[in-house]
Image (cartoon, helix red, strand yellow):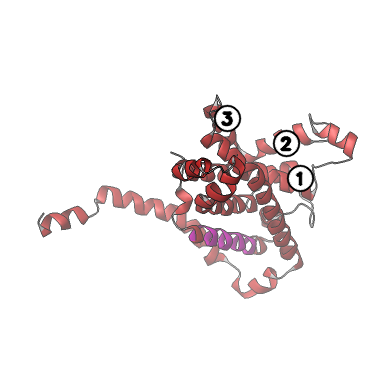
Amino acid sequence: MSARTIRRRGRLPVVLVLPALIGLAFLVVPLAGLLVRAPWSTLLDQLFSEAVGQALILSLVCASLATTICLVLGVPLAWLLARSDLPGRRVLRALVTVPLVLPPVVGGVALLLVLGRRGIVGQYLDAWFDISLPFTTAGVVVAEAFVAMPFLVISVEGALRGADPRYEEAAATLGASRWLTFRRVTLPSIAPGVVAGTVLCWARALGEFGATITFAGNFPGETTTMPLAVYLALETDPGAAIVLSLVLLALSVTVLVSLRDRWITTPT
């Protein structure tokens, strides 16, 4: 192959480059607008204000608790979808991924209908155990877990489908139980997928708005997370809204950069 042919193949076609650059600008310029319009002179004062601190701490705690719930429930669910012979797995997978495309507000309404005080399940939680989830901090955690779990399940299922099953078969041949094989062989082999899914799940929970405000409300110090604080501040103090948005932007970029290319892993 000649050097001329190699150079020709290395050139990028203009018909693709131009739309790509326009698309990049479409995504990046609005984010850059936050930096341009940020109130840099009062940034530190607003960043360390009580309202921002409360919203940030509440967001971090709720997102972490929601991610823990997603790990406990999502990893076994991903294993069920990837390794079991359960009939109707395609339907189950579609149901699991519905929150990805479902408007978050609709998810919040669904949670209210099921877990509200008069909901299908919530009425019994309230009557038997005196547990009420709507408009509480626990409700924030439930709403975030609902919308974030598909990110974890998809990532872990993709890792399971890509893992070499021969190691598990070898462990079974040596007499290891299914649970021992899962803990000592399967989980270590899919650890990168679990980590990627966990971080994406946490980031999605951190940025959740629609389901949270619908199911948990907007009560400062109790259910007002960072996205809700941005919404409130936008009406009364746009400068504070920009500061809060910058914090969420910084956290999101940090998460995605730390994952590198692993976040695009999908099931095969």
Res. 72 in view:
yes
Q: Which residue lies at the image location 59% right of the left edge and 41% below the top edge?
A: 177
Label 3: few (<14), some (14–19) or many (≥20) C-alpha neighbours in 10 Å: some
Q: Position of residue 226 (x, y in %)?
A: 68, 57
Asked if residue 206 lies left or right of residue 85, the reply is right
Q: Position of residue 195 (x, y in %)?
A: 55, 54
Quadrant in the picture for the N terminus: bottom left
State the separation of the CA atoms marked 2 and 3.
19 Å
**Depicted 127 relative to depicted 153: above or below:** above
Element at label 2: helix
Magenta span has 110? no
Asked if residue 74 lies left or right of residue 185, the reply is right
User: What residue range appears in magenta?
Assistant: 242-257
Res. 231 in view:
no
Q: Which residue lies at the image location 79% right of the left edge and 54% below the top edge?
A: 222
Which marked residue is nearer to the observer: mark 1 or mark 3? 3
**Depicted 182 relative to depicted 203: above or below:** above
Residue 139 tag number: 1
Report which residue position mark 3 lands on. Answer: 92
**Depicted 87 relative to depicted 265: above or below:** above
Residue 242 tag number: none
Residue 111 tag number: 2
Q: Position of residue 196 (x, y in %)?
A: 53, 53
